[in-house]
Image (spheres, rainbow, N blue to C red):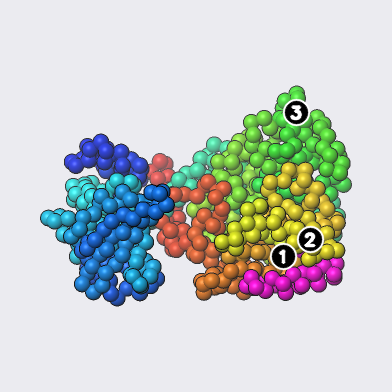
Amino acid sequence: MSVAPHLALDTGLESLRGIGRERAAQLRRLKLFTVNDLLFYRPRRYEDRRHFHAIGDLQAGQTGTVRGKVLALGVKWYRSHSKSVFELIVDDGTARLHCRWWNLPFMEKYFQQGDEVFVYGKLKTLKPRTIDHPETEVVEAGEDRSIHINRIVPVYPLTDGLPQRWVRGLLWRTLSQFESQIVEPWTGIHFPDLPARAKAVRQIHFPESMAEVEKGRARLALDEFIELQLSLQQRRKNLETHARGLPCRGDNRLIKPFLLQLGFSLTDAQTRVLRELRQDLAEGAPMRRLVQGDVGSGKTVVAACFALMAIESGFNAVLMAPTEILAGQHFQTFQRWFEPLGLKIHLQTGSNKTGAARNSKSKVHSGAEVKQGQFEATRLAPVPALYIGTHALIEAGFEVENIGIVIIDEQHKFGVAQREQLVRKGRYPHLLIMTATPIPRSLGLTLYGDLDISVIDQLPGTRGKIKTFLRTTDKLPKVLEFIIQKLADGRQAYVVYPRVEEADLRTGLKAVTVEFEQLRKQFSPYRLGLLHGRLTAEEKQRIMTAFRANEIQVLLATTIIEVGVDVPNATVMLIENAEQYGLAQLHQLRGRIGRGAHDSYCILLADLKTPQARERLSVLEQTTDGFRIAETDLKMRGLGELLGFEQSGVPGFRFGDLAGDLPLVERARTIAMKIKAWQQRGIQ
């Protein structure tokens, strides 16, 4: 269904007129190799050069484009020629503008007195009117004014030595030559509300209006989403065609006594999701399902029941967690749940290497052999068991036979490639992915488009409420008094900092090790613990064990506690420098409290310099709905902030915007299903 390759569009750029060896090398640095790459090179912004700002009208803090003549220019050196500033003075008849570039003396060679220039940037001061490091473009005599002047002009990402107007001219010539070769990619599909693909390409480079820019972008984004949806559907189809699901439904002989010993009943949402999982296991193909559940919704119990289904059926189960702390906590929880049923739990982490189950030298740690954090090696028994671990599970040296199911906790902390590595340890095992980060629908349809999705949308009724308060940094003394009151009531508390050792006095960022000594005095006689990523696995385990046992009343930590840490008696959390975090991450951190019967309190201490900062963080005061928070985070801070940088499975869109393109994503999904149906009928 996609476009058949045309020689002209695949032509290397070095073959085009005006592109020599040096220019071709510069374009390659921008990942532009062919005509097709160039035509779909997206401008990063646009300047409306039909209307300019007068320099005299610019206000401090205002961003705009002006046009004027260079009156003077020169470089001033400081500190024995080690530092410099290049200054360009531009006049448009209304006022003068000083343009400054620090430590870039070579900029002087790009301008001459009398040059006419465009200048774009934010006015820093009024006396004199100054812009630091603006974007500039010299208007050359005799150049094509229809490309660079008196129109909406594209501004492209550049590399060293590549002039903006040269790239714009290259695009103009190339588009004129090859536009007719840009054909529709989807046979039989028409978009009456959007431009044809060739016209869309012209609109993103040389639009007549900003409305045309958005129409062209939307059309090209829709093409990207359709292509992605087709690949996701093909991936799912390949799995269903070539793999048979293992018989892992179980017979309830372990699940019934497990549920009876829990001491509480499952919520309706947990029961519904378990029913969906069991139904998946009855299908012919291996299960591929994502279970979303807000913090505290009971995903771990669902995972336990799912693992028991496999063990009842004679298969091993594997659970991978992103951190040793979370893997260790899961180990202790499942050990407490499963050992009364006569089942073995094995732990495999980076600090506890255990080898491969099929290797005669293989050694793992089972629940029966773990004593006070001291691990002793033992050979694997050939009976079905649960294996819990971190990334160590996907290393080449670790092998387990007869894997029936794979569970991945906090999927957003792993890449898709890591997920596939673990699945390949078995022979098409069933896959359950769990996340407490609510996934906005647009993201769910793209990142997890090949998975079925279940939502645990109900919290256990036995838990206390979480109340969140946003406070400025000057309120810290009162906040500490409040925490001490709660400690006196027998509760425990977390205090979270963004850094480990290096505080930043200039920005006010605090470090957990720096604050530890001071707070130890303030919280006396209560005992403090210190937890961060630079501690050894044994030190982390010792601290968490003491905190769970209430031997430590206040835990000072970094975001290492973000996922999975479960201490029901901890009911207070103070997060310092809260403005540094995304909303989804703050919501995850907040989920470490509110896990017991008592009401809990989350205090966000932030430097609220702008109304936007207050507006963003106040969302957490208003709601504990993780989906609303995730949608807000996606819109305000973007995809990387929501998912974290570990997630390598995020598609790289040139024109698509997952924060605002949900209607296009849903439309693409429908179109892709229609195309697949046509293809299948054609095959049959």
Question: Which residue corresponds to mark 2?
Answer: 520
Q: Quadrant of residue 270?
A: bottom right
**In the current view of this chain or complex, which residue is farthest to the left?**
142
Q: Is residue 477 visible?
A: yes
Q: Residues within 10 Å of mark 2 (few under 14, many from 20)?
A: some
- Say whether disc 1 or disc 2 marks the residue closer to the N-terminus: 2
- Membership of 100 in magenta stretch: no
Looking at the image, do the residues carrying marks 3 and 2 touch, with CB atoms under 8 Å apart? no
Looking at the image, do the residues carrying marks 1 and 2 touch, with CB atoms under 8 Å apart? no
> In the image, residue 33 lies at what x, y percent?
31, 40
* Cα–Cα gap, marks 1 and 3: 42 Å
- Say whether disc 1 or disc 3 marks the residue closer to the N-terminus: 3
Residue 260 - label: none
Residue 362 - label: 3
Is label 1 in a helix, a strand or a loop?
A: strand
- Membership of 476 in magenta stretch: yes
The amino acid type, in three-letter code, at marker 3 is Ser
Which quadrant is the N terminus positioned in? top left
